[in-house]
Image (tube, helix red, strand yellow):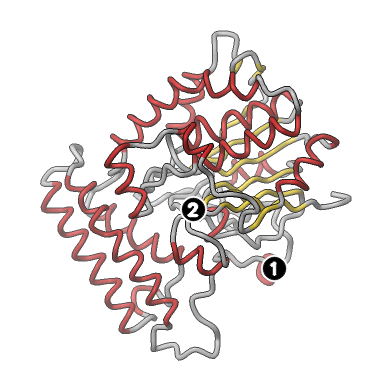
Amino acid sequence: MESSSPTVPFPLLQTPIESKYRVCTIPYRFPSDNPRKATPVEIQWIDLFLNSAPSFRQRAENDPTVVDAPIKAEKFAQRYTAMLEDMKKNPESNGGPPDCVLLCRLREQVLRELGFRDIFKKVKDEENAKAISLFEGVVRLNDAIEDDSKRVENLIRGILAGNIFDLGSAQLAEVFAKDGMSFLASCQNLVSRPWVIDDLDDFKMKWTTKTWKKAVIFVDNSGADIILGVLPFARELLRRGTTVVLAANDLPSINDVTYPELVEIISKLKDENGQLMGVDASGLLIANSGNDLPVIDLSNVSPDLAYLASDADLVILEGMGRAIETNLYAQLKCDSIKIGMVKHPEVAQFLGGRLYDCVFKYHEVLNY
C-alpha cells in the first residue's frame, strides 16, 4: 500500500536542502532535551493524535470495502493508541522522536496494514458531488466583482472558507457530523483581519501589477476546499494567462483529495470545449505529488511533479497540514504563498493566534 515510486526533492526548494529546509514548523524538542524523556510539546501533540483516534476508528468500522471492518477498526485503535502511549514513555520508540510527519505516518501505516485504504471515501464522494453542484454559483459571484483587487481578496477568502472542511480536526469532524457546513456562510464568518499571519494587502498590490507564468498549487481537502476554494482561484490565474499545476496526493489520507479523484472532478467541471465556466482550461495540469499524508515533506515529491514544477514562478501550499504544520518557513526559489486555517488549538498557541485564525503568508523573490 505504500507509495512505491521513487521520490526526488522539489526543485524550487532553496539549496542546500539539508541546511535550509526544515519540514516541520513546530519544534517538538531541542538538542538540549533528554532524548529518553518526552517533552511537554511532544506530549501535547501525542495527546492531540490520541484524541482523534476514536473518530478514525468510527470511520474505519463503517468502511464497506473491508471484511470484518469493526474488528479491524478496533485493532487499529488499540495498535495506534499503544504506539502513541509508548512514545510518551520513550520518545525514541516507533521511529521517534515524534514530529507531525511521523505521527501521521504511523496512523496511515496501521490503517493500511489492516486493509483500510480510504476510510473517508464515502464522505469525500458526497462532499465532492455537493460542491460540484455549487461551483457555478460561486464562480458567478466572484466574476461579478469588477475590481481586481476586491475579486482576488474574495477568492482568497474562498480558499480559507473551503479549508474548513477538514475531518482530521476532531472539533470540526464533530461540527460537520451535526449539520454540515455552508460554504458562503463560512466565507462571511472568517475571523476578522488582521489574521495571525496576514500578507494579503501586499499580495493584492502585486496581483494588480504582476503576472506569473506558471503556478504550482499543493491542494488539500476534497469537497468545498478544492472545488469552491482552490478551483475558482486557479481559474482566475488561467484567465490571466498563468499555467496552473494542481498537485494532489498519490494515496488517500483523511479527506484529502487524491490525484485520481482530482482528475475526475476536473473532467466533471469542464464543458465540452475544455473550458471552466468560459475560461480556457488547457493550461490546467494535474500532477501526482507522490505524497500519502495530510502533511508534506518537499524533499520527497514525485519525479512527474518535479518536472512540471521546475519552471514555475509561483508556489502555493494550501491547508493546515501542508502550509502551516509543515512548510510554513520553507524557503523557495520563487514567489510563494502559504495559506490555510488554524484548526488545532496547539497550532494557534504556537503562532500566537486564535483558533480558526487564518494564515496568508506571501513571499516575493526578486530576480527569480
Q: Residue at x 26, y 53 (%)?
A: 55
**Which percent across, then down, holds residue 287?**
56, 37
Label 1 is placed on what type of residue? Answer: Lys
Q: Residue at x 43, y 20 (%)?
A: 133
**Which percent across, then down, holds residue 132?**
45, 23
Q: Residue at x 37, y 52 (%)?
A: 168
Left or right: residue 201 versus residue 144 is: right
Q: From the viewer's side, name the closer residue of 321 and 186.
A: 186
Helix, strand or loop status at disc 2: loop
Q: Which residue is mark 1?
A: 20
- Quarter-of-image position of residue 66: top left
Left or right: residue 113 versus residue 255 is: left
Q: Up-down: is 192 above or below 106?
A: above
- Quarter-of-image position of residue 45: bottom left
Q: From the viewer's side, name the closer residue of 259 and 49.
A: 49
Q: Residue at x 34, y 54 (%)?
A: 171
Q: Which residue is mark 2?
A: 356
**Which percent across, then down, holds residue 141?**
59, 22
